[in-house]
C-alpha cells in the first residue's frame, strides 16, 4: 500500500469553528482521506491516497460551500490576500446600517418619532438581507445538507426571521413594530466583528511573516573568478558561490569559503551577540552580516534553507490541535442544534403562554444571534497561534500544540549531561599509563586517535585533537573496526586488537588496585574516563574534562523555583557524575546509563511523575529518550532543526530556554483556559437574558461580535514583553 500524500489548502469562507468542522466532514467523506482543518489559520492539511487528486479535494470543499486553493508550501500560506468582494459586502452593510444605527439611540432618547420611516428601512435592509448576507445563507444550506450546523445557520435563521416578520407587518398594514433595522445592524455588527477578528488573527501570524521577510530577493552570484553580479534569488543553485557585503542580510544557507565577519543571528535564535564566522563555518539565510565581506558556497536556497524550514514548522505547529481542543469540538457539535431548540422554545413559550407572539419572535431572534459560537471556536487556536509565534521570536521552536500543552504540566526535567548541562567540548586532561609502561604516551594517543577516527562522539574529538597536538599527523591503518554503542570502539592495528572503552573496574583485571585508585582520584575532578585496551588488558587511562554551561546553575535554580524536580542522566561513571551533579544542584543523578537504556530510565521516571516528564538532550544520541518523554527538548546547537524526536527545539542553544519554554507553555495554557471561560460564561449568561427579553437582537449582535474580539485580544496579550 502506497504512503498517503499530504496536501495543504488555504480555505476561504470560514466564519466559525463549526464551518471548519463542516469542511472536515466534507473532505473525509472521500474514502481513505483524513483532514485537519484549523479555523484560526484558515488551512486544511489533508492526507489522502495517491489515487485521490488535489482537484477532487478542492471540488468537495467547494461543494460544501467554501473555497480552497492548494499551496505548495505551508510557508507560502501565511499571508492571505484580501477578498475584494467580501470587502464590498462589508462596506455595503456598514453604509446601510449606519443611518438605522444612528436613529435607534436618538429614538430612545427623544421618542419614537425619530425612527427612520418603515419604507426607507425596507430599502436599506433589502440589499443587506438579500445580497450582503448571501454567504451566510449559502453556508447554512451546505451545512444542513451535510447534516451539520454552524454559525451561518444561527445568523440566517435570526436575521431572516426578523426581516420576514417585518415584511409581513409592512404589507399587511398591521400596527406593530418592524425589525428591519435589527436584521441590518446585526449583520453589519457580525461582519465588523469578523473584520476586526481577521486583522487580529493576521497580527498573530506576524512572527512567521517577519521570518519570511528576512531573506533578500537578490544575491551577488560569482559569474567568473572574482567577478560577482547581482541576480534574483531564484537564479541561485546549491554549489554556487555568493558574496555577502558588509551590513547585508545573508540570502542563502552556505559555508564560508573566504573572509571573516561577525554575523547577527538574533532573528533566528534570539541571541543578541553576533557570532564570529570564518572559513568552513555555516551561515544562514536571513541573518545579518557585520563589517566583513564573506564569500560563501551555497548549500540551501529558497525552501531548502533553515529559515524556510523554521517558518514551515511554526506554521504547521500553529495549525495543529492541542488536546484541550477536543472539549471544544464536542461542545460545538451539539451547541448549535441546542440553541435552535432553545430559540423555538422561547418563541412558543412567549407566544402561547404569554400570548405575545411579537415579543416571542424578537426574543427568539436575540437567542439565535447571541449564541453564535465564534468565541468558543477561537479560544484555543488563537492562543496557540500567538504562543507558538512568540516562541519563535524568542528562539523556541515548538513543533506542535500537543508539546506546548504538555510542557505546562511537567513535574520533572531530565537533562543529558554532556553537551546539555556541560559545554560538550571535552579535552583530554590526563593520560595515566600502565605501571610497566609498555607504550609511550604518543603511541597510546596515536592508537586511540586511529580507533576514534570515524566517530563523532565528543570523546573522539578530544582524542583526535590531543593526538594531533602531541603525536603529530601520523596515522595508523585500522581493520575489523566496530563501534559498540555505549561501550567503545574496537579494531585491529598491525595485527593486534585494540579498543578505547568506557571505564569499568571490571576491565582492570591486572593491577586492579592501581587502576581503581587512579580512577577514584580522577573522578573527584568530575572527569570522564576511558581505557585503552590491548588483548583485554588496560594500557592507559584517559581522563577527559568538560565545563559546565554558564547558565546551567541558573537554569536548575529557576526550575526549582517553579516547583520542578531535576534529574541528570548520563553514561559517565557514577563518581564523576556525582561531583558534577552536586556542583549544579540537581535533585537526582542517574549515571552509567547506556544510550539504549536512557529511554527506559525516562519511562521509569514518567511512571512515577503524574504531571509528566521533560527530557532535554542534544537530539541525536538522545533521540529515543526524547521520544519517550512527555515532551522532548533538543538543544539547537548549529541550527540543526532536523531533530524529529523533539517536540521543542531551542534554536538559541541556551539552557535557560528550557525555563522560557515551560513559562511560555503555562502562559499559553492559561490564556486558553481564560478564553474558554469567557466564551462559556458569555453564552451561559447571555442566552437566558435574551430569552427573557432583556437583550434586543441588535445588542445581542454587538455583544456576540465583542466576545470574539475579546478572545482574540486576550490571546494577543501573550505578545507583551515580560
Image (cartoon, rainbow, N blue to C red):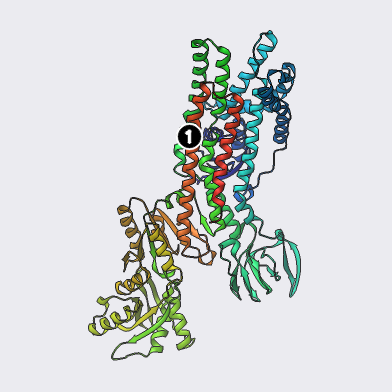
The front one of 474 and 107 is 107
The answer to whether 151 is drawn above or below residue 221 in the figure is above
Identity of the residue drawn at 60% across and 34% down = 705
Q: As drawn, which residue projects farthest toward the front? A: 110
| Side of 570 where 323 appears, left or right | right
- Across and down, in percent, residue 388 comes to 53, 51
User: Could you tell me if residue 470 is visible in this image?
Assistant: yes
- The residue singled out by tag 1 in the image is 680
User: Could you tell me if residue 535 is visible in this image?
Assistant: no
Specify few, some or many for label 1: CA neighbours under 10 Å numbering under 14, 14-19, or 20 or more.
some
- Across and down, in percent, residue 187 comes to 65, 28
* Mark 1 secondary-structure assignment: helix
The front one of 341 and 503 is 341
The front one of 636 and 476 is 636
- Across and down, in percent, residue 11 comes to 61, 39
- Across and down, in percent, residue 712 comes to 57, 42
Q: Quadrant of residue 372?
A: top right
Identity of the residue drawn at 42% across and 72% down = 548
The answer to whether 665 is drawn above or below residue 248 in the figure is above
Q: Quadrant of residue 301?
A: bottom right
Q: Quadrant of residue 557?
A: bottom left
Amino acid at each position: 500500500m502506497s504512503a498517503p500524500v499530504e496536501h495543504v489548502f488555504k480555505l476561504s469562507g470560514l466564519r466559525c469553528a463549526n464551518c471548519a468542522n463542516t469542511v472536515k466532514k466534507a473532505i473525509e467523506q472521500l474514502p481513505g482521506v483524513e483532514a485537519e482543518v484549523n479555523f484560526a489559520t484558515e488551512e486544511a492539511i489533508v492526507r489522502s491516497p495517491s489515487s485521490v487528486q488535489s482537484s477532487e479535494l478542492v471540488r468537495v470543499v467547494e461543494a460544501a460551500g467554501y473555497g480552497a486553493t492548494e499551496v505548495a508550501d505551508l510557508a507560502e500560506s501565511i499571508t492571505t490576500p484580501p477578498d475584494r468582494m467580501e470587502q464590498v459586502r462589508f462596506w455595503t452593510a456598514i453604509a446601510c446600517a449606519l443611518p438605522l444605527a444612528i436613529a435607534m439611540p436618538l429614538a430612545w432618547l427623544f421618542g419614537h418619532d425619530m425612527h427612520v420611516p418603515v419604507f426607507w428601512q425596507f430599502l436599506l435592509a433589502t440589499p443587506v438581507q438579500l445580497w450582503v448576507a448571501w454567504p451566510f445563507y449559502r453556508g447554512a444550506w451546505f451545512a444542513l445538507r451535510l447534516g451539520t450546523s454552524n454559525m451561518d445557520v444561527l445568523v440566517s435563521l435570526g436575521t431572516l426571521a426578523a426581516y420576514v416578520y417585518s415584511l409581513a407587518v409592512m404589507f399587511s398594514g398591521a400596527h406593530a413594530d418592524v425589525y428591519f433595522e435589527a436584521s441590518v445592524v446585526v449583520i453589519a455588527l457580525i461582519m465588523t466583528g469578523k473584520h476586526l477578528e481577521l486583522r487580529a488573527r493576521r497580527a498573530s501570524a506576524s512572527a512567521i511573516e517577519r521570518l519570511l521577510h528576512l531573506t533578500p530577493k537578490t544575491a551577488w552570484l560569482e559569474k567568473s573568478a572574482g567577478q560577482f553580479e547581482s541576480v534574483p534569488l531564484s537564479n541561485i543553485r546549491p554549489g554556487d558561490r555568493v558574496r555577502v557585503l558588509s551590513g547585508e542580510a545573508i540570502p542563502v544557507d552556505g559555508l564560508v569559503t573566504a573572509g571573516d565577519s561577525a554575523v547577527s543571528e538574533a532573528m533566528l535564535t534570539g541571541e543578541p551577540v553576533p557570532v564570529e564566522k570564518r572559513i568552513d563555518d555555516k551561515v544562514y539565510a536571513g541573518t545579518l552580516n557585520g563589517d566583513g565581506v564573506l564569500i560563501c558556497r551555497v548549500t540551501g536556497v529558497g525552501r531548502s534553507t533553515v529559515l524556510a524550514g523554521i517558518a514551515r514548522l511554526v506554521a504547521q505547529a500553529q495549525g495543529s490541535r492541542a488536546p484541550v481542543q477536543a472539549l471544544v469540538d464536542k461542545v460545538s457539535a451539539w451547541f448549535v442544534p441546542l440553541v435552535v431548540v432553545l430559540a423555538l422554545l422561547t418563541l412558543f413559550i412567549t407566544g402561547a403562554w404569554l400570548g405575545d407572539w411579537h415579543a416571542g419572535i424578537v426574543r427568539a431572534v436575540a437567542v439565535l444571534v447571541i449564541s453564535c459560537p465564534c468565541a468558543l471556536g477561537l479560544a484555543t487556536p488563537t492562543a496557540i497561534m500567538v504562543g507558538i509565534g512568540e516562541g519563535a521570536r524568542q528562539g523556541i521552536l515548538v513543533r506542535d500544540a500537543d508539546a506546548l500543552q504538555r510542557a505546562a504540566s511537567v513535574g520533572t526535567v531530565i537533562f543529558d549531561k554532556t553537551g546539555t548541562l556541560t559545554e560538550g567540548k571535552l579535552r583530554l586532561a590526563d593520560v595515566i599509563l600502565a605501571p610497566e609502561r609498555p607504550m609511550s604516551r604518543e603511541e597510546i594517543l596515536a592508537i586511540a586517535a586511529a580507533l576514534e577516527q570515524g566517530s563523532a562522539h565528543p570523546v573522539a574529538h578530544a582524542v583526535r585533537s590531543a593526538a594531533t597536538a602531541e603525536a603529530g599527523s601520523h596515522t595508523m591503518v585500522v581493520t575489523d573496526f566496530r563501534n559498540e554503542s555505549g561501550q567503545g570502539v574496537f579494531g585491529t592495528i598491525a595485527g593486534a586488537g585494540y579498543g578505547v572503552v568506557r571505564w569499568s573496574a571490571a576491565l582492570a583485571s591486572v593491577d586492579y588496585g592501581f587502576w581503581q585508585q587512579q580512577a577514584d582520584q580522577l573522578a573527584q575532578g568530575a572527569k570522564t574516563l576511558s581505557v585503552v585496551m590491548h588483548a583485554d588488558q588496560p594500557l592507559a587511562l584517559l581522563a577527559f574534562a568538560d565545563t559546565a554551561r554558564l547558565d546551567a546553575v541558573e537554569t536548575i535554580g529557576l526550575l526549582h523555583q517553579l516547583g520542578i524536580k531535576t534529574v541528570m542522566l548520563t553514561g559517565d561513571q557514577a563518581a564523576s557524575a556525582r561531583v558534577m551533579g552536586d556542583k549544579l544542584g540537581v535533585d537526582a543523578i542517574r549515571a552509567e546509563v547506556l544510550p539504549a537504556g536512557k529511554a527506559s530510565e525516562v519511562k521509569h521516571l514518567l511512571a512515577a511523575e503524574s504531571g509528566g516528564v521533560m527530557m532535554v538532550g542534544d537530539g541525536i544520541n538522545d533521540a529515543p529518550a526524547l521520544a519517550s518523554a512527555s515532551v522532548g527538548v533538543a538543544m539547537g546547537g548549529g541550527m540543526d532543526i532536523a531533530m524529529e524526536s523533539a517536540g521543542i527545539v531551542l534554536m538559541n542553544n541556551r539552557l535557560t530556554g528550557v525555563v522560557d519554554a515551560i513559562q511560555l507553555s503555562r502562559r499559553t495554557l492559561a490564556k486558553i483556559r481564560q478564553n474558554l471561560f469567557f466564551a462559556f460564561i458569555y453564552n451561559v449568561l447571555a442566552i437566558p437574558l435574551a430569552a427573557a427579553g432583556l437583550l434586543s437582537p441588535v445588542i445581542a449582535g454587538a455583544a456576540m461580535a465583542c466576545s470574539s474580539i475579546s478572545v482574540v485580544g486576550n490571546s494577543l496579550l501573550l505578545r507583551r514583553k515580560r
